[in-house]
Amino acid sequence: MNAIVLALPGSERMAQRLSELSGVPIGIIESRRFPDGEAYVRLETDCAGRIVVLVCTLDRPDEKFLRLVFLAEAARDLGAVGVGLVAPYLAYLRQDRRFRAGEAITSRTFAALVSGHVDWLVTVDPHLHRYGSLAEIYCVPTSVVHAAPALAEWIGANVDRPLVVGPDAESRQWVQDVATRAGAPFVVLAKTRHGDRQVDVSAPDVDACRAHQGCTPVVVDDIVSSARTMVEAVGRLRAAGLGPPVCVGVHAVLAPGAEQAILDAGARAVVTTTSIPHPTNAIDLGPLLSPALRERVS
């Protein structure tokens, strides 16, 4: 395969891991800012005749997107035969409709911008709510990698007698998959969201909890941002008489203070995947992402 992996700032570890697992060599870029704050990027590795794979997880996307565009277009100008994007976390999916008059439907706009600069996209568990698939808004081929196998493997290896807990009805199918793979029972709570930082989570079924006394609750969610959902779920489980839960998230968006809020609510630990670099990372997504990368460049 004639391809090269390039890491945008903040995604160096993931890029290195994907290079190791896929056999695609990693290249070097220079990235800095001018005194006025504008971005400067330069490809130090020759990309002529190659497929360029940009690795950029898109948390805090407003800080990253222009550099991504500049690198993609520079690679084409310098002779790349294709440009792909591995974005373990894909931003701007929450605004999938106009909830209030005058709002921008940013998911569609962002998808059009990304699709205009790369030839394909690989991501992990995008937060699709009202869209059936990324194909509804992305105009380029997309590959979606599911983190459930990695979560289940970690839970099975690190949690004694796990009880997998989904925070809301939308998570049922996904949580059931994780629990089945881990050989564990599961329960699903109900969630009502009143705003960006206000969430109500229902109490778990008391009889179901009694049946799982002695188990370790494992609250599993795809995105942990403000952490209000996790905090509420932990509180409900503790009030129902269950032990301190382990909280597992796929995407560690984690606003300042969010991890501590979960621990203060009574959680035993907070664990996340490597989709977004964070001290809570313990679940390696490289083995799941590398086959998707190889398929795109082969």
Image (cartoon, grey):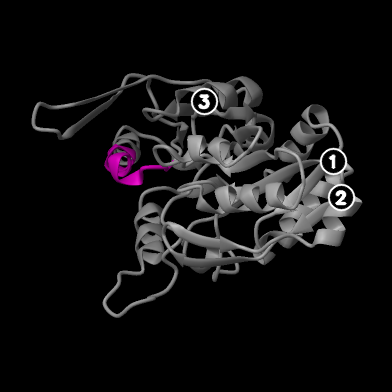
SS at circle 1: loop
- Asked whether the beta carbons under mark 2 and mark 3 sit within 8 Å of each other, the answer is no
Q: Residue at x 65, y 56 (%)?
A: 167
Identify residue type, mark 1.
Cys
Among numbered discs 3 and 1, the one appearing first in the sequence: 1
Nearer to the camera, 100 or 293: 100
* Quadrant including the C terminus: top right
Q: Which residue is mark 2?
A: 185
Where's residue 6, x and y in %?
Answer: 43, 27
Most extreme residue toward the left is: 36
Quarter residue 285 falls in: top right
Mark earlier in primary sequence (2, 3): 2
Tag 1 residue: 215
Residue 49: percent from left, percent from top: 44, 31
Circle 3 SS class? loop
Closer to the camera, 3 or 222?
A: 222
Q: Which residue is mark 3?
A: 279
Magenta stretch: residue 69 in it?
Answer: yes
